[in-house]
Image: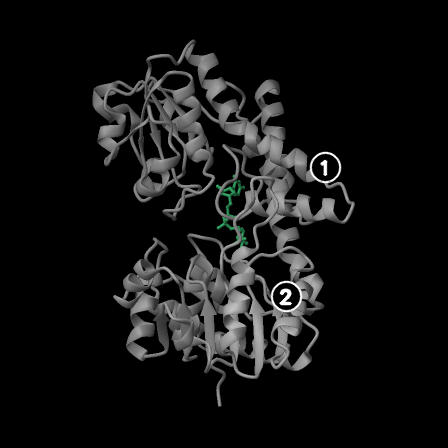
Amino acid sequence: MQNRVAIVGGGYVGLTTAAIFANAGITTHMVDIDEKKIEVVKGGKSYFYEAGLDQLVASGLKKGTLLPTTSYEDAIPEADIVISCVGTPDNPDGSPNLKYIYDAARATAKLAKSQLIFVQKSTVPVGTGDALGEVFKNEFPELEVSYVSNPEFLRESSAIADTLFGDRVVVGGDCAQAVTQVVALYKVMDTHKKEIAATAAITTGAKEDAHEVKVVETSLKSAELIKVTANAFLALKISFANSIAKLADEAHADINEVMDGVGLDNRIGRAFLNAGRGYGGGCFPKDVSGLISVANDHGVDLHIMGAATEVNASMPGYIVNLAKEKAGSLEGKKVAVLGLAFKAGTSDARKSPAVAVANSLAHEKAEVRAYDPYANEEAGPDLNRTVSLVDTLDEATKDAELVFIATDWPEFKELDYSKLDNGSVKFVVDCMNALEPEKITKNGIGYLGVGRGKS
Ligand code: UGA
């Protein structure tokens, strides 16, 4: 008989995983204590924007395999495998706050079957599995828990494709049988991946056709460390590219050309070497600070990651300064900020560098109007109160002298900036190097990118 799964925590990772497993025919409860979120999901939709997820939620409900609930009592007693996907926000000192991790583990243990496979998908510091093992042993001695680490590598905005066609599935644990049962879930998913992609209307090509699930089995602690190390390395690549971009600006080189040339080296690769306003979101900033913090606990100074963090934090101000050099002063200037999400394809504006760009402009006393097609609501609370949040691109760009492309949504790439508001725009600041400069300059508008030679 197939294992029944309960997913605890219905966020980006939890809901995507639950919807995909349910569409693979696996009976999947999804518990989240937030009634509003569960109501939306029960209604057949995701409560955040992620392409294809609405379709998978609706189809999972229709099949009867996706079972959203606010009640642990509904979900846990029958589950063979419980997958923890709760959030791990950071503390003010940068260390990870594991309250939800411990709460979810205890709430599960109170109701679980006597033999439980507990899978940790949330990003946790190395050693958390051992610490939770002690909690289970000391507080729930009647339970036999096999603890497995199965870190998540999906990206927001391509979450479904990343799950179905990911580079690897990492499963680490000390109980071989439990590891095998978790791997089996992914094998079931793998046999259904094409039909799930079709339900989600995800476009697939030759790469996806040739895809085979690659399982990496490791020790518990290695699995825990793989996840944060991967995110930290990607963050490092971005900050490295941004450091070289600053040099390219001074030396009149073009960072895109530089990284295209560098990235062709197979040992390096081109991905995550795009310079711009830096990284944000719910993962990189907190995973980097969490890794620094756990390294400190072990007496290891990861100053390379401290440097990456500093470079990242400097980028929004650096770009605004470039614009200030070009415009003379920004005070009183009408500026449109297009894009507030931490990246295109998501409504997520957590720790968004695009918001930091808008706030830095407000600090320079520019008259800022900001617009994002999906992230206005989430970005609103983090914006400086002098920034006007508007509902349309036209409102944002009305009379604007400067336009900042702060998140590279496709609709901003395709705009003809010379036609905006009868030609009020004097120059476009391309905070993610997403535009082709010639398309802007041929119409007599100035172009400013990041690391493209301070033209
Ligand atoms: C990241 C990882 O890529 C996933 O593998 C991981 O599963 C996830 O965190 C997580 O830990 O849950 P995500 O935060 O969704 O995924 O977003 P990314 O696509 O990695 O982008 C992160 C940030 O880096 C964005 O702000 C993006 O604009 C920025 N970025 C990315 C750059 O500035 N330059 C680049 O070249 C690439």
Q: Is residue 269 visible?
A: no
* As drawn, 424 above or below 412: above
Label of residue 132 in the image: 2
Front residue of 320/44: it is 44
* Kind of residue indicated by mark 1: His
The type of colouring in the image is one colour
* As drawn, 450 above or below 148: above
| Residue drawn 70% across the image and 63% down it | 221
* As drawn, 192 above or below 357: below
* As drawn, 408 above or below 107: above
Q: In the rendering, at what x and y percent does residue 172 appear?
A: 66, 69
Front residue of 432/81: it is 81
Q: Residue furthest top?
A: 328
Q: In the rendering, at what x and y percent does residue 254 appear?
A: 56, 27
* Kind of residue indicated by mark 2: Leu
Which one is closest to the eye, mark 1 or mark 2? 2
Left or right: 96, with 6 as reference point: right
Few, some or many C-alpha atoms within 10 Å of disc 1 (few <14, some 14-19, many ≥20)?
A: few
Label of residue 256 in the image: none
Left or right: 206, with 267 as reference point: left
Q: In the rendering, at what x and y percent does residue 410 appear?
A: 35, 42
| Residue drawn 59% across the image and 44% down it | 270
Q: Residue furthest right?
A: 299
Q: Which is more N-terminal, label 2 or label 1?
A: 2
| Residue drawn 39% across the image and 69% down it | 19
**Which residue position holds label 1?**
303
Disc 1 is placed on an element classified as helix
Q: Residue furthest bottom?
A: 1
Q: In the rendering, at what x and y percent does residue 348 appear?
A: 40, 46
Q: Is residue 338 visible?
A: yes
Q: Quadrant of residue 421?
A: top left
